[in-house]
Image: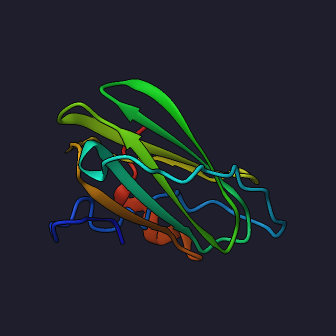
Amino acid sequence: MFDIGSGRNLFAPLAVVLLAAGCGGGGGTSTPQPAFDGDLSQVLTITIRNEQIDAARITLFINSRRERLGDVRGLSTQTFHVPMRGGASVRMSFDLTLGASCVTRDVELGPGDVIQAVIPVDLRLMQAACRGR
């Protein structure tokens, strides 16, 4: 599920963020994210739970500007903090190590928003959250 902190749902299943493509075993490494000591009201907070065995590479697009967030190891959760000055059109790209990928639809987000996304074991659940290619 993909939620924004205030209780409003974004793309109902952004947890459903990867296209249904075959995925096999194998783990990955995570890019460590330093602890954030700043004012959380000035950042977009994104927590991603990867229920896949494979690592997922996460890229964020803010007003079409690409920002690589990092990797989320298989069977783990990672939180990212992205500084934002104001509201912007945001979309995410998820790429699994062994091939499946998805780019979400654009959503208006801003500083202080908190997003939680799940990359589920059954990738067919994610088709609704992916935009056309």
Tell me: residue 105, above or below residue 65: below
Q: Quadrant of residue 29?
A: bottom right
Q: Residue at x 31, y 39 (%)?
A: 90
The answer to whether 72 is drawn above or below residue 60 in the figure is below
**Identity of the residue furthest to the front in this view:** 37
Residue at the extreme top of the image, as rendered: 65
- Image position of 58 (left or right of 126): right
Quarter of the figure with the N terminus: bottom left
In front here: 39 or 101?
39
Q: How many marks?
A: 0
Where's residue 17, x and y in %? 45, 58
Counting from the top left corner in percent of width and height, residue 87 is at 17, 36
Q: Position of residue 3 (x, y in %)?
A: 28, 66
Q: Quadrant of residue 127?
A: bottom left
Residue 85 against residue 116 in the figure, above or below: above
Name which residue lies at 40% across and 41% down.
82
At 30% from the left and 26% from the top, the residue drawn is 63
The way the protein has been coloured in the rendering is: rainbow
* Residue at (65, 71) in percent of width and height: 52
Q: Which residue is situated farthest in the right direction here?
A: 26
From the top left corner, tell me how far across and down residue 58 is, in percent: 56, 46
Task: Looking at the picture, tell me which residue is in the foreground, 15 or 20.
Answer: 15
Q: Point out the image quarter for the C terminus.
A: top left
Q: Nearer the viewer, residue 79 or 121?
A: 79
